């Protein structure tokens, strides 16, 4: 329903002013850079007047800077329509949280919501109105660098965390919250061969069953914007795909908000081969319902013929303009274009102790203990430790999309460890991708003096995120050579891995007594890791994405289909050649989805399963026989029911993170919602399972206990 203010503005605005609202320009257009004026402005026949009717800008923040640009803009705006400030605030603004894939490992929606709330507060006091997040693309291919930005391979986990993130960013859109832009619509996370920007080719059935749920959850959570994806889907580039944006997003999901293209995605319709020129690209995107053109200048083409637009184009421009004005109105910008932003509020909020503590708390929940032979962890304070590796003493712990973060202000793992362990020494041993003999020999000499070796390995932030696809997902050979040399010293090795993607850690697992996955843990990640290694915090992270034994297994994910010749690990399977398997590698992953160890000894036992209305309730008993408390994630999987379309061998349908005190039992109830007890048939119609349903309960996806219940859907 268009508000009175928006209706009135639409009547007063000229066609040029409406077209202006559809343009998003980058920061440099508003900072008077000569390169812009002589570059894209000339190239696209833009005038300064165009700049000052553009509806939004991306990449500008800072209370004073935003205030000055907004004031300058409004002074030039005939109808005083405020400028919208947008940016990528993905896992924190100046206080950086673990990368989203790391936060997903917390399996804690409250932790994800907290991270988004802090990010929103810090962004809002710095003048931002919209974040290009959450990214909820389902991912199954660690070769693709942007897995770091997602929450992993499971539709249900992604849906729960997508809602949590939107709720955290938006709240009630007061001046401490910002609008969320769910991205990238759609299925950008499934590029063939894991190659960035590559073709996505999914059946609509699979798209709807596995990729659509998380976008749908974000939209149901009232995300205010959706961003188009660079890729094709169903044979058409998403940014021009009317089936995707009109039929599915607008009609089926009833999305009433703003659609923004990804950077130059409208212009790229020419490269995709569906548009012969920029005007044709503009027409296709506008017809698909793309409201804002991010930096392709395609919509600026309409300025050159504003007086002669046909009625249908004029109507589409009005619709898009209305949605953009409604977004500005929902942010209160017409009432207060500055949203109470002041340098004082900004100063008090950015990297506050409260915010940094929140980042540490979420990092502690995200770190995953993958191996702990002979309970070598946690470490006693008085142990002589050698911290060795290229990631041991660096602030490069923030990961991609941390543009406002400061690595130089980020304590390194060595700094944090030295505060807790008086006898820790350090040597780099090598660089990320480079060995030199002096460093190498120094590291071995340092390691020889210690009781235990902590190898801190991984990749730099620059090798994670957008445009970082890799064909080899092992650690760099230089680091593996260092690890092999350390292993020859005959001392126990604890390997800590800093990464934005699942890696092939087969050799690391072989050579290490313990393996700790730190992800890119954020501004206080080093302190969080130190608390885990010292036992001050009991690790509770679980994998949101499968870790393969080899890149040759990719895509590998837990919720796979059984096939007609499943490998069922019975005796004769070894003899039977004609099964779905490899001759040179196991089918199983190195570390499965949902896996993560604890210092406590916790077991899960299903007690009962009953139908309650159209839901199913499962009672589960957890017992902790260890002398210390621990959190864990109880996972409930629906075992492959019989249906008219193939169903995953198991599918996560409920989970809960629980604290289990030492030497105690805890009983909890998991509720499986009715919508999790449905499937899509071959005609894309949603059906409901009926009859006996088997659920698998466990603390990861592989080690589970079954319980069944008759489910009547009358
Ligand atoms: C990038 C990304 C998108 C981001 C946008 C603006 O290319 O694909 O996720 O929000 O440009 O920075």
Image (cartoon, helix red, strand yellow):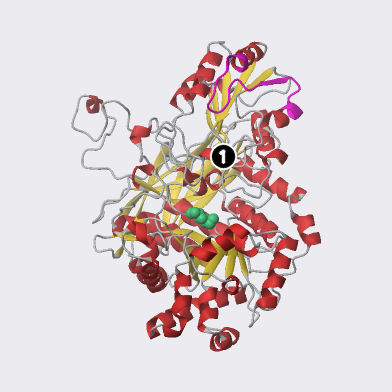
Q: Quadrant of residue 117?
A: bottom right
Task: Identify which residue is drawn at 35% across, 57% down.
Answer: 271
Quadrant hosting residue 30: bottom right
Q: Is residue 161 left or right of residue 110?
A: left
Left or right of residue 201: residue 339:
right
- Which percent across, then down, holds residue 391? 61, 30
Q: Residues within 10 Å of mark 1 (few under 14, many from 20)?
A: some
Nearest the viewer among 53 and 485 is 53
In this rendering, is residue 483 above or below 411?
Answer: above
Residue at image mark 1 = 461
Q: Residue furthest right?
A: 344
Residue 690 visible to an observer of this rendering: no
Q: Decide which of 419, 198 is in the foreground and name it.
A: 198
Quarter the C terminus occupies: bottom left
- Of the pair 242 and 663, the residue shown nearer to us: 242
Label 1 CB less than 8 angstroms from ligand 1: no
Q: Quadrant of residue 368?
A: top right
Residue 424 is a magenta residue? yes
Disc 1, SS: helix
Residue 328 x %, y %:
60, 74
Query: Which is nearer the eye, 408 or 32?
Result: 32
Left or right: 22, with 65 as reference point: left
Q: Is residue 599 visible?
A: yes
Q: Residue at x 35, y 71 (%)?
A: 247
Find the magenta span and give its range: 418-439
Q: Position of residue 492 (x, y in %)?
A: 58, 17
Percent from the top left, x then y, of residue 186? 40, 58
Q: Is residue 400 magenta?
A: no
């Amino acid at each position: 329903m268009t508000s009175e203010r928006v209706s009135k503005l639409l009547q007063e605005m000229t066609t040029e002013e409406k077209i202006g609202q559809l343009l998003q320009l980058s920061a440099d257009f508003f900072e008077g850079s000569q390169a812009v004026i002589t570059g894209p402005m000339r190239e696209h026949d833009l005038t300064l007047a165009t700049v000052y009717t553009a509806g939004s800008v991306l990449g500008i923040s800072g209370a004073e800077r935003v205030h000055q640009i907004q004031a300058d803009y409004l002074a030039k705006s005939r109808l005083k329509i405020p400028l919208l400030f947008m940016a990528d605030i993905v896992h924190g603004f100046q206080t950086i949280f673990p990368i989203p894939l790391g936060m997903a490992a917390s399996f804690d929606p409250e932790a994800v919501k907290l991270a988004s709330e802090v990010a929103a507060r810090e962004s809002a006091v710095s003048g931002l109105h919209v974040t290009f997040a959450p990214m909820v693309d389902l991912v199954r291919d660690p070769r693709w660098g942007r897995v770091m930005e997602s929450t992993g391979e499971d539709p249900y986990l992604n849906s729960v965390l997508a809602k949590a993130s939107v709720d955290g960013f938006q709240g009630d859109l007061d001046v401490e919250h910002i609008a969320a832009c769910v991205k990238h619509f759609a299925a950008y996370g499934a590029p063939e061969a894991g190659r960035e920007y590559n073709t996505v080719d999914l059946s609509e059935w699979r798209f709807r069953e596995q990729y659509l749920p998380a976008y749908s959850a974000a939209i149901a959570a009232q995300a205010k914007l959706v961003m188009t994806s660079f890729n094709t889907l169903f044979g058409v580039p998403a940014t021009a795909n009317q089936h995707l944006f009109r039929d599915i997003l607008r009609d089926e999901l009833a999305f009433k908000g703003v659609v923004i293209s990804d950077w130059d995605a409208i212009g790229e319709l020419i490269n995709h081969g569906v548009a012969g020129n920029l005007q044709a690209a503009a027409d296709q995107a506008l017809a698909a319902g793309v409201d804002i053109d991010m930096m392709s200048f395609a919509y600026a083409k309409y300025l050159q013929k504003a007086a002669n637009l046909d009625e249908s184009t004029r109507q589409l421009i009005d619709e898009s303009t209305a949605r953009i004005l409604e977004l500005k109105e929902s942010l209160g910008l017409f009432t207060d274009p500055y949203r109470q932003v002041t340098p004082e509020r900004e100063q008090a909020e950015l990297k506050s102790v409260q915010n940094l503590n929140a980042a540490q708390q979420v990092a502690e929940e995200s770190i995953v203990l993958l191996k702990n032979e002979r309970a070598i962890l946690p470490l006693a304070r008085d142990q002589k430790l050698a911290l060795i590796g290229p990631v041991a003493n660096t602030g490069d712990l923030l990961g991609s999309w941390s543009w406002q973060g400061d690595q130089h202000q980020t304590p390194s793992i060595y700094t944090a460890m030295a505060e807790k362990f008086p006898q820790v020494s350090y040597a780099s041993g090598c660089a990320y991708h480079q060995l030199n003999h002096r460093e190498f020999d120094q590291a071995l000499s340092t390691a020889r003096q210690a009781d235990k070796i902590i190898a801190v390995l991984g990749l730099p932030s620059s090798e994670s995120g957008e445009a970082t696809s890799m064909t080899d997902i092992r650690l760099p050979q230089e680091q593996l050579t260092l690890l092999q040399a350390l292993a020859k010293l005959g001392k126990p090795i604890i390997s800590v891995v800093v990464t934005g993607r699942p890696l092939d850690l087969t050799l690391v697992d072989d050579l290490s007594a313990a393996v700790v996955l730190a992800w890119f843990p954020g501004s206080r990640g080093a302190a969080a890791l130190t608390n885990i290694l010292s036992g001050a915090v009991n690790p509770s992270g679980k994998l949101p994405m499968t870790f393969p034994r080899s890149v040759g297994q990719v895509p590998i994910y837990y919720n796979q289909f059984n096939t007609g010749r499943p490998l069922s690990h019975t005796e004769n399977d070894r003899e039977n050649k004609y099964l779905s398997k490899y001759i040179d590698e196991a089918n199983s992953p190195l570390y499965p989805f949902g896996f993560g160890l604890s210092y406590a000894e916790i077991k899960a036992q299903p007690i009962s399963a009953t139908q309650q209305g159209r839901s199913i309730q499962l009672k589960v008993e957890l017992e902790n026989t260890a002398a210390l408390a621990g959190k864990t994630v109880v996972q409930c999987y629906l075992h492959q029911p019989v249906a008219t379309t193939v169903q995953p061998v198991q599918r996560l349908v409920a989970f809960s993170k629980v604290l289990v005190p030492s030497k105690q039992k805890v009983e909890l109830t998991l509720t499986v919602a009715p919508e999790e007890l449905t499937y899509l048939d071959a005609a894309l119609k949603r059906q409901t399972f009926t009859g006996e349903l088997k659920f698998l309960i466990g603390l990861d996806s592989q080690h589970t206990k079954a319980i069944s219940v008759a489910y009547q859907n009358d």
